[in-house]
Image (cartoon, helix red, strand yellow):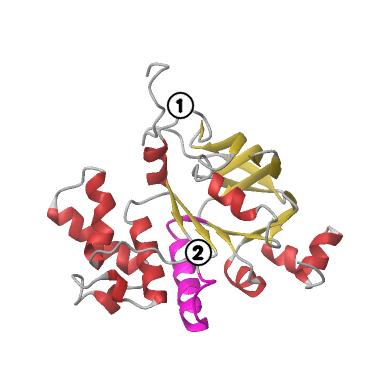
């Protein structure tokens, strides 16, 4: 690999990274070091050092403007065109924030789902296969298998299997969000980033999204931004509390919600501010 070629991810690269947290050893999927983000002169995120355990769900909580979505979007370079990102984002031994990284290739491994469902104005099946075809997958059998597998993993298959040629825009909001999740996991990423994926949904649809995430963590590392404290407590293994662009506390979710160490965390989870 020459210096002027973009770095890409290889299946031969080591994937196991070990850290110490609460005296136990954990397998790390992604970590950040001294990560900070500027929007013009304003620093929106300051020195964020976090490590995300593989096959676990981590919730990022905090008031609006606390930096949690900025942090999440930085993890697969979504802030590149709107801000300046400094620091390291380590995935498979490479710094995702490096200018040498092939961003398009990287996003196959670190997928993103946004707050509001954004299905393409295409059929259900085309929503799933579009990115796959863009990445050179043309075999009809492979495409059909990926469609079914991803829709099953997103708990949507049974609801749409007889209408795969139906427009994705005709689905309900909750179904559209699960379709977007299916579209993201069709590329078989390692990590799934979700920015308030159920905030625009009704309680029943939100519950289905939560059930889906609990199933997905068997195969994926999930990082989710949520304003819903009950949701964070229900679905996540770890929780990071952000305040004014800083990570105030990061620990097991049960500790964050029952025995936080920092007064600002105590105030936030008890609803005293934010």
Q: Position of residue 13 (x, y in %)?
A: 42, 32
Residue 212 appears in which quarter of the rendering? bottom left
Q: In the rendered structure, which segment of residues is drawn in magenta?
A: 198-222
| Residue under label 2 | 115
- Looking at this rendering, what residue extends furthest in the front direction? 40
Q: Identify the secondary structure beneath mark 2.
A: loop
| Residue under label 1 | 100
Q: Position of residue 65 (x, y in %)?
A: 68, 57
Residue 199 within the magenta-colored segment of the rendering:
yes
Q: Is residue 140 visible?
A: yes
Q: Position of residue 44 (x, y in %)?
A: 68, 46
Residue 28 within the magenta-colored segment of the rendering:
no
Q: Residues within 10 Å of mark 2 (few under 14, many from 20)?
A: some
The N terminus, quarter of image: top left
Q: Identify the secondary structure beneath mark 1.
A: loop
Whether residue 180 is situated above or below residue 189 in the rendered picture:
below
- Label 2 vs label 1, nearer the camera: 2
Where residue 194 is drawn, which disc sits there?
none
Q: Describe residue 165's horizontal placement relative to residue 262 as left or right.
A: left
- Looking at this rendering, what residue extends furthest in the left direction? 140
**Which residue: 65% across, 40% down?**
38
**Which residue: 44% across, 63% down?**
216
Counting residues from the N terminus, which is met first, the one under dot 2 or under dot 1? 1
- Looking at this rendering, what residue extends furthest in the top direction? 2
The C terminus, quarter of image: bottom right
Gap in Å between the C-alphas at discs 2 and 1?
Answer: 29 Å
Number of dots carrying numbers: 2
The residue nearer to you, when weighing 219 against 157, is: 157
The residue nearer to you, when weighing 113 against 148, is: 113
Residue 87 appears in which quarter of the rendering? top right
* Image marks 2 and 1: residues in contact by CB distance under 8 Å: no
Q: Describe residue 62's horizontal placement relative to residue 132 as left or right.
A: right
């Amino acid at each position: 690999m020459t210096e002027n070629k973009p770095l890409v991810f290889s299946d031969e690269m080591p994937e196991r990274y070990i850290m110490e947290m609460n005296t136990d050893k954990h397998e790390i999927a992604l970590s950040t070091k001294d990560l900070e983000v500027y929007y013009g002169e304003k620093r929106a995120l300051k020195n964020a050092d976090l490590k995300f355990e593989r096959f676990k769900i981590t919730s990022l909580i905090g008031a609006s403007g606390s930096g949690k979505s900025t942090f999440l979007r930085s993890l697969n370079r979504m802030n590149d065109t709107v801000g300046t990102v400094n620091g390291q984002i380590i995935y498979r031994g490479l710094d995702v924030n490096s200018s040498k990284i092939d961003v398009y290739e990287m996003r196959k491994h670190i997928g993103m789902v946004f707050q509001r469902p954004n299905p393409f104005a295409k059929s259900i099946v085309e929503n799933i296969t579009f990115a796959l075809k863009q990445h050179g997958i043309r075999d009809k059998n492979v495409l059909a298998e990926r469609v079914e597998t991803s829709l099953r993993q997103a708990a949507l298959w049974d609801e749409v299997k007889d209408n795969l040629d139906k427009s994705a825009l005709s689905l309900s909001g909750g179904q559209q969000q699960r379709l977007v999740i299916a579209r993201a996991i069709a590329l078989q990423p390692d990590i799934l980033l979700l920015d308030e994926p159920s905030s625009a949904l009704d309680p029943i649809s939100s519950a289905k999204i939560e059930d889906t995430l609990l199933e997905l963590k068997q195969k994926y590392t999930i990082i989710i931004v949520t304003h819903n404290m009950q949701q964070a407590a229900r679905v996540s293994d770890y929780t990071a509390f952000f305040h004014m662009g800083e990570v105030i506390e990061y620990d097991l979710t049960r500790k964050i919600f029952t025995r936080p160490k920092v007064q600002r965390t105590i105030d936030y989870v008890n609803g005293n501010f934010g």
